[in-house]
Each structure stands twice: as C-alpha cells, then as structure tokens.
Image (cartoon, helix red, strand yellow):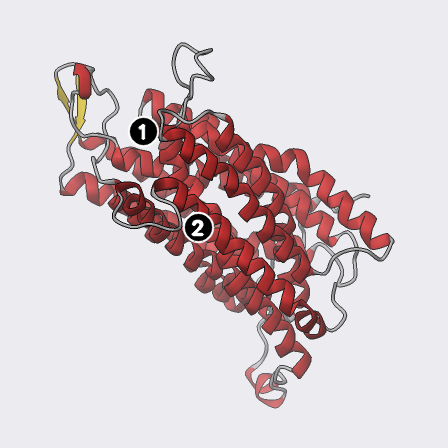
Amino acid sequence: MHHPKGLWLLFIAEMWERFSYYGMRALLVLYLISSTSAELAGGAANLNPGFGWSEESAYLLYGIYTWAVYLTPIVGGWLADRFLGTHRSMIVGGWIIAAGHILLAGTELFGITAGAAVTLQTGPGALLCFVGGLALIVIGTGFFKPCVSVMVGQLYGPNDERRDGGFTIFYMGINVGALLAPLIAGTLGETVGWHWGFGSAAIGMILGITLYQAFRSRYLEGIGLPPKAEPKAVEEAAPRPPLSRVEWQRIGVILVLAFVANIAFWAAFEQAGSSMNVFAAQNTDRTLWGLLDTPFPATWYQSVNPAAIIIFAPVFAWLWVFLNHRGLNPSTPTKFALGLWLLGLAFLSMVFGAMDAQDGLAAPHWLLITFVVYTWGELCLSPVGLSMVTKLAPVHLQSLMMGLWFFSFSLSNLLAGLVARYSVRLESGEATFLIEGLPGFYLLLVVAPIATGFLIWFISPTLRRWMHGVQ
C-alpha cells in the first residue's frame, strides 16, 4: 500500500525531534541525582558529576518538565490554526528546541576542576543555564509537536483507509529517534560526560529541521500553509456556523479518551524515564549475569520500547487492515481498553523484578519483558489516538484538538512524576499498597491501568454512537 512521499519527510523530521527529546529524557533524572562530589563511595574519582539532588526532587522536576512539554502545544496549536500555519510553526519550534539543548550542554561551562575530577558548580549560574535550556525546549515543543501530526493527517482524504497505517508508519519515525537517543545520547552522557549527551540531542534537532526545510517544497507543497486572510466585511457577513450536535459529540469522544484513558495509560508508562530508569541504574544486574566485565549503561533499557515498536508496528498496521476487511476491526475505544490491559499486565513483570531486587540485583530480563509487553499496549492506543483526533476533530479546530490531545499527555506526565515520588515512600516503608516496598508500587501500576481499561470498555458503546460512523 503506497503512501504520499511527504509522509517520509515528516517521518524524518519527527524522528530527529524525538531523538533530541528522548536523549534528554534518558539523562535528566540520572543527571540530577548524580553526586556533585569529586569522589564517589569507595574512593573512586567521580568524572561525571551532576546536581546531587534527591530522587524525590528529581522525580518532581521530571514531572513538571514533561508536564510543561506537553502543555505548550495547546498554545502552539492555536497559533498555527489562526496565524502561522503548521509549516512555519514547525520551523520556529525546531530551532528553539535546538537552542535549548545547546544551552543544556553549556551548563558544563560552569564546572570547575578539582584534582583529577570535574566538580559541577551548582550555583545560580549553572542552575539558570540548565533551567533556561529546559524552558526553551518546552517553548519550542509547543510550536513543533501538534503541527507535524496535523500535517500527516492533511496528506490523506477524509475516508482514506491508509490513514491509520500512515499514522502507524509515522509513529515508527518517532520511535526510530527514540531508539537511537538512549544508545547515542544516553551512552555519551553516562560514560563520557552529561554535556556530550545533551549536545548530541541538539545535533539531532538541527539535522531534522534542516532536512525538512531543504525538501519541503518538493514533497509537501501546499501542506501546512497559514490560514488565508479574509476581508473583514466577508467575515462579518458570513460568520462561522456554530458546532453541530454531531461535532460536539465527536469532540466529546476525543475528550473522554484523552482525559481518562490516555492519562491513565501514560502516567504508568512514563515511569520509564523516572522510577524505572533509576531501578535500571541501581537495582538491576546490567552485567547480564556476569557475562560483561562492566555494566552496560542504564539508559539502554529505554531503547527496548522503541525497538519493539519498530519490530511490531508493521504487524499492528497490517492487523488493523486485515481485521477491517473482515469486519472485525475493534473500535477505537476498544483498542484503548486493550492498550490499558496490556500495560497493566506488563507491570506484573516489574512486581517480580522488584521482589528479585530485595535479595540483591534484579535479573536483567524483568525490565526487558515489561518494556516489550507495554509496547504492545502502546501500539493499540497511541498511533490510533493520533489518527482519531484528525478524523473526529472539526477541520478548523484540528490543531487545537491536537493540542488538547497533547495536553492530556501533559497532565499524565505530571501525574507520572508524582507517582514516581510515591515509589520512594513505598521503598522506604513510609507507605504500602497491598504488599510492601517496590513490589507494592509496581502492583499499583498493574491494578490502575487494568481497572481503567474495564471502564473504557464498559462505556465504549456510547462512545461509538458519538463517533457517528467514524471508525
């Protein structure tokens, strides 16, 4: 099945933007909790110091930052719809993101030499540089993120059956970048220096936006243009009609799936960059049962999810078309329920891994199983959700609705940071959930998504009626 050539250009642009984001995401918490001391326990030199924050503080900043990253697309989507157009908004956002990563890399300029090691000067200059870099990434993502997905939707007609498959292919581009980021930026950050990791993320963003600008006129002509200015008299004579009952109900479906199912899913899923990242670094045997002389970087685990998406996304894209031709394709709400159930089942592996870690280091396969199984859940929910927004949203509100879709990610990421902080309380014994310690924390992440999945499944007949024939 052939897809428009412009899909591949948007694939590449999004791939490099996601490389920059996931490279920083893989390093953020580990960088924040890394000791500022020039000497580690046991007398070893600390050649890669960080800010020396507590886990709880690092998780809170991680939650606030990822909340903000997905909050600004609401404003960015509105600006694109009303003034800039998606094309210009992407370019503005891409260059601001690149500047943010460059500023993060520049935090190292505030380091001072202390013997054989470099100690980070955690004064106001370093902190200002670091927070300024995060702020630029937040602003730039607001311009970039909602627009690229809308442009993918603009490549297809309203009833084009290739649309879901096109979004799944586009989703593979996201995950090629997410796969490379921990392997390149994560390895550089953990083993060479944090600033090398942040700097490589900047290079990725610059590559993506440069390629997009170079080839846009050839493959995306007429896509993403700003709205045409209308004479004031014409606007006053023919105001836009109010939304119809069908349009409001379709918007209702977007809101229910975004602010119930999507938030429940990603609040658990986004433990990957926080509590699961620290579990990989501190509680997992990364020597592969002693086969390696030195542990592999903890950030490598974050490449498992995108690698599984690259492997299984074509299978799911084929599966939806196969089932559709036979009249068996699950509705969008049912796919969301399936995604939540798979996510909950995936965290059963983490329950056993946390139990294993109580006797030492957890075996390396527990995290691996979790990442693979919850990837299957993601493929039932995330690309389908992107496609759903472009199909159900009124044409003149598509970028705004995409912004609201990403706003649900914003809230789920903030919740994910707060949930990760709760893991510290459970691990210390200050709180319990059915069973003590980290096993209880991961059991919570089993129960909550599965329960939400049953809720979505129960109301799915109503949601299907509100979709008014849209599949």
Q: Residues within 10 Å of mark 1 (few under 14, many from 20)?
A: many
For residue 22, side relative to residue 105 (left or right): right
Looking at the image, the residue that sits furthest to the bottom is 237
Classify mark 2: helix, strand or loop: helix
Which residue occupies 18% across, 32% down? Answer: 110
The residue pinned by badge 1 equals 194
User: As shown in the figure, which amino acid type bears the numbered disc 2?
Assistant: Leu
How far is the residue under mark 2 from the one under mark 1?
A: 33 Å
User: As shown in the figure, which amino acid type bears the numbered disc 1?
Assistant: Trp
Q: Does 247 appear above or below 380?
A: below
Q: Nearer the viewer, mark 2 or mark 1?
A: 2
Do residues under tags 2 and 1 come within 8 Å of each other at their CB atoms? no
Q: Quarter holding the N terminus?
A: top right
Looking at the image, the residue that sits furthest to the right is 326
- Expressed as whole percent of the image width and height from the top left, the position of residue 408 reads 48, 60
The residue pinned by badge 2 equals 444
Is 257 in front, or is 173?
257
Q: Quadrant of residue 327?
A: bottom right
